[in-house]
Image (cartoon, grey):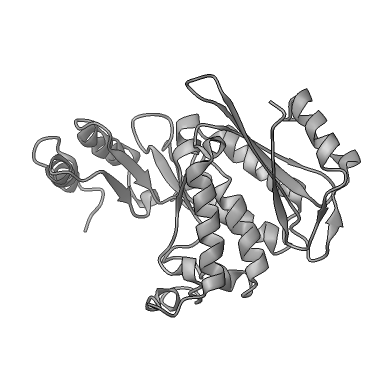
Amino acid sequence: MNKDSESFHHYIADPKTGVVSYWTKRGVDGWRLDVADELRDSFIGQIRTAMDQYPDRVLIGEVWEDASNKIAYGNRHHYLEGGMLQAVMNYPLRNQLVALVNGQESVDDWVQAALTLQEHYPRSVFQNNFNNIGTHDTERILTALGGDTNKLSLLVNIFFATPGVPCIYYGDEVGVTGGKDPDNRRFFPWGQGNKAVEAIYTDALQRRRTDPALANDASFIPFYGYRWGGIWRHIVDAQQHSHDALLVFNPNEIPILADIRQLHTDNLTLDQTAYLQQHIQTTPIPAYGYQWLPADMV
């Protein structure tokens, strides 16, 4: 198939007769473009134009790196500059979290990487990305963490504390293991899943669904001290009520006592900093541990 052929573009993306229009008109909610790097920007734009005839549809692209400045096959792509992709698969997030929890990246490096991605992406994209920690193209998340459920629990809680649409690869939520494709496509273990892993996902999902401060449009402020980190989420609802969620964590193999004296406060308000100085300095955090603190300072 010649993906650069104009006749192919017409067949797929013609606003009246194309494949995209045909199925979108019949109720398809959105489209994911596999390996978006292999498609011309102009073709992606045609697909978006066909979709925009119908309200509340989404166009997602598979892009493995930072999609705001992606160069592939010698071409600089403009995925997120309007009229093309509305979200991408957030593989950078997965890579950052695995590296953090496996000790391959420091907490301050993780914060800088998270803030860089937030700065590079338009707000609507950052808040609605296809967040994942496992897909058919990666090894299973529990395998990537060496089978350590403490690491998994920490990673899952950070994952669900991050803006975006959290997507779970079937079986990850019950501890399915496996290396890269095809080993990551094992059968779902009906009735025989890992209950401890299932509880990790259930608790994190419940918090995400019920805490207003974890909504996608809530502010996202990652911060760090010496060998420990945190995420502060904040939102004011339609009734002008403030909601806050505060996660602090230790991605190290040894317990630590969070040292507030080395807190980096560049992205925190004075009130948030004062709250942390009052509550964090006496907070012991076990190895690969985390705590959700009552952020009632507002």
Q: Nearer the viewer, residue 62 or 226?
A: 226
Q: Quadrant of residue 47?
A: top left
Q: Nearer the viewer, residue 197 or 101?
A: 197
Answer with left or right where residue 160 lies relative to residue 222. Answer: left
State whether residue 187 is above or below residue 149: below
Where residue 20 sits: x, y (%)? 18, 44
Q: Quadrant of residue 29?
A: top left
Quadrant placement of the N terminus? bottom left
State whether residue 20 is above or below residue 196: above
State whether residue 173 is above or below residue 83: below
Answer with left or right where residue 256 lies relative to residue 13. Answer: right
Residue at left 23%, top 55%? 2
Count how many numbered circles sit on residues in the image.
Answer: 0
Quadrant placement of the C terminus? top right
- Farthest residue in the top direction? 240
State whether residue 230 is above or below residue 123: below
Q: Is residue 140 visible to us here?
A: yes
Q: Is residue 65 visible to us here?
A: no
Residue at left 25%, top 52%? 3
Answer with left or right where residue 202 lies relative to residue 2. Answer: right
Residue at left 50%, top 51%? 206
Q: Nearer the viewer, residue 268 or 212?
A: 212
- Farthest residue in the left direction? 17
Where residue 294 sits: x, y (%)? 69, 40
Residue at left 45%, top 43%? 129
Where residue 263 sits: x, y (%)? 84, 39
Where residue 172 sits: x, y (%)? 48, 67
- Farthest residue in the right direction? 261
Q: Quadrant of residue 242?
A: top right
